[in-house]
Amino acid sequence: MERYHLYMYRGCGFCARVQRFLQELGIEMPLRDILTDHGALHELIEGGGRQTVPCLRIEDAGDGVRWMYESADIMRYLAETRDEAPDAARV
Ligand SMILES: N[C@@H](CCC(=O)N[C@@H](CS)C(=O)NCC(=O)O)C(=O)O
């Protein structure tokens, strides 16, 4: 089962869009605010390679980690994942 974290900051419109989408789908997801949490910012840059948000951190059952940028890609990915295996889209 995959685990997700959403890297974001308050006031980011693209992040708000993804957060609204999560609400609509009833998906609860831990948020990592890169402006208030310097550890989160460091993780994002080290792991994803850029400090752009939103970014979805996807951790699979085998401990592999992927970093997905682009709000549209994140929403499409979550919608598809949810359709394929509803439980997998929930944290
Ligand atoms: N096309 C991207 C745009 C993301 C974007 O522009 N994010 C802004 C915040 S709203 C950002 O992180 N800018 C700083 C940067 O890219 O370094 C998306 O839809 O996710």
Image (cartoon, rainbow, N blue to C red):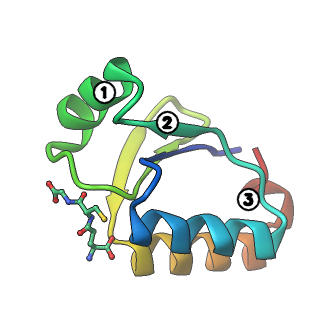
Return the x and y of residue 20 as percentages of the image width and height: 66, 72
- Position of 6 compared to 29: left or right? left
Mark with earlier residue (2, 1)? 2
Whole-number angstrom distance, CA of label 2 to CA of label 1: 10 Å
User: Which image quadrant: the N terminus?
Assistant: top right
Mark with earlier residue (2, 3)? 2
Q: Residues within 10 Å of mark 2 (few under 14, many from 20)?
A: many
| For residue 60, above or below residue 21 | above
At x 69% / y 47%, what residue is drawn?
A: 29
At x 36% / y 58%, what residue is drawn?
A: 68
Mark with earlier residue (3, 1)? 1
Amino acid at circle 1: Glu
Amino acid at circle 3: Ala
| For residue 21, above or below residue 54 | below
Whole-number angstrom distance, CA of label 3 to CA of label 1: 22 Å
Q: Secondary structure at mark 2?
A: strand
Return the x and y of residue 32 as percentages of the image width and height: 49, 36
| For residue 63, above or below residue 69 | above
Q: Are marks 2 and 1 in contact (CB under 8 Å)?
A: yes
Closest to the camera, between mark 3 and mark 1, is 1
Amino acid at circle 2: Arg
Residue that badge 3 annotates: 89
Return the x and y of residue 81 as percentages of the image width and height: 66, 70
Residue that badge 2 annotates: 32
Q: Secondary structure at mark 1?
A: helix
Answer yes or no: is residue 81 visible. no
The circle on residue 43 is: 1
Q: Residues within 10 Å of mark 3 (few under 14, many from 20)?
A: many
Q: Could you say which is closer to the camera, residue 30 or residue 63?
A: 30
Classify the position of ligand 1 by quadrant: top left, top right, bottom left or bottom right.
Answer: bottom left
Quarter of the image for residue 23 reads bottom right
